[in-house]
Image: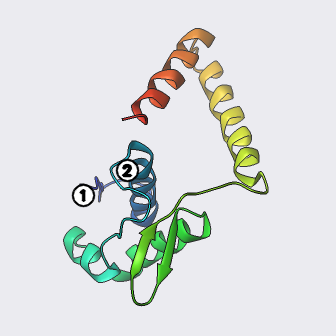
Amino acid sequence: MILKINMQSEVPIYLQLRNEIVRGIARGEFAVGESLPTVRQLAADLGVNTMTVSKAYQALKAEGFLETDRRHGATVCRAGDPNGVFREKLAEELELLIAEAKLKGVPREEFFSLCTAAFAGMEG
């Protein structure tokens, strides 16, 4: 498991870690049912505080990407969206990205092309 964390980034480390794990799940690098390293192990591997890893795991659990258990640790699970909360969040974030792209002069077709390429990158 290779997680890219930028200690110089303005993005909080727990959020970078959360994002890297989500990308890894989407790309198939982490399979449903696969155990992730313990909080202590991952913190040691990355050279970060255990609370940072714990916060990332808690966020992933709250979003339905992980299940946690005291005996088995954190395992990847199939994330559903039964209440449509994610789709609402997606629509809001896409609207903001589209607005920023438009203001920066990115043509519509180029935006769609970037979206298509990013989506394809998640298909392994």
Using residue 45 as the reference point, say whether residue 9 is left or right of it. right
| The N terminus, quarter of image | bottom left
x, y percentage for residue 78?
A: 54, 58
Using residue 44 as the reference point, say whether residue 72 is left or right of it. right
The residue drawn where x is 42% and y is 65% is: 33
Quarter residue 10 falls in: bottom left
**Can you tell which mark lies on residue 24?**
2
| Vertical placement of residue 12 versus 118, above or below | below
Determine the secondary structure under disc 1. Answer: loop
| Vertical placement of residue 109 versus 114, above or below | above
The residue drawn where x is 39% and y is 61% is: 17
CB atoms at circles 1 and 2 under 8 Å apart? yes
Within 10 Å of disc 1 (Cα), the crowding (few <14, some 14-19, many 20+) is few
Residue at the right extreme?
Answer: 83
Residue highlighted by disc 1: 1
The residue drawn where x is 58% and y is 9% is: 109
Please, which colouring scheme is shown? rainbow
Quarter residue 36 falls in: bottom left
Residue at the bottom extreme?
Answer: 70
The residue drawn where x is 68% and y is 42% is: 90
x, y percentage for residue 93?
A: 67, 41
